[in-house]
Amino acid sequence: MMQEAERCPICSGKGMIELTDSQCPFCNGTGERTKAAESYMKVHICQCIFLDRKNCPICGKKCHHNTPNRPKILIAPM
């Protein structure tokens, strides 16, 4: 079993992106941490629009459309 520090931060070590039901492009399905995944986590765009529009499914933080982690506009669901 992989330790937390060894897991891919994008797919949580599962090798699959649950939201899109596809193989994780950062670890190529292995679930192992990569430099590409680490870099992406530092600069990713908030993906809250894919879930509840309040929390980012990538990092689990509140909406952060205006970095660093401060929303410029909170998008309300339609």
Image (cartoon, rainbow, N blue to C red):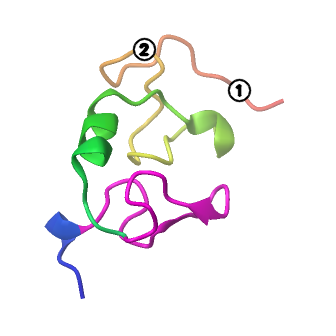
**Circle 2 crowding by C-alpha within 10 Å: few under 14, some 14–19, many from 20:** few
The answer to which image quadrant residue 39 occupies is top left
66 is within the stretch colored magenta: no
Tell us which disc is closer to us: 1 or 2: 2
16 is within the stretch colored magenta: yes
**27 or 57: nearer the eye?**
27
Tag 1 near tag 2, CB within 8 Å: no
Residue 25: x, y in percent? 48, 52
**Magenta segment:** 7-30
The answer to which image quadrant residue 42 occupies is top left
Residue on which disc 1 sits: 76
Residue 73: x, y in percent? 56, 13
The quarter of the picture where the N terminus appears is: bottom left
Instruction: Residue at 46%, 27% (x, y): give it.
Output: 45
Instruction: Residue at 22%, 46% (x, y): give it.
Output: 35
Residue on which disc 2 sits: 66
Residue 43: x, y in percent? 32, 27
Callout 2: helix, strand or loop? loop
Earlier in the chain: of badge 1 and badge 2, it is 2
Above or below residue 59? Residue 53 is above
Instruction: Residue at 55%, 36% (x, y): give it.
Output: 47
The numbered mark at residue 43 is none
Q: In this rendering, would 38 be left or right of 27? A: left
Q: In this rendering, would 72 be left or right of 69? A: right
Distance between the Cα atoms at labels 1 and 2?
Answer: 16 Å
Q: Amino acid at mark 1?
A: Ala
Q: Amino acid at mark 2?
A: Asn
Q: Residue furthest bottom?
A: 1
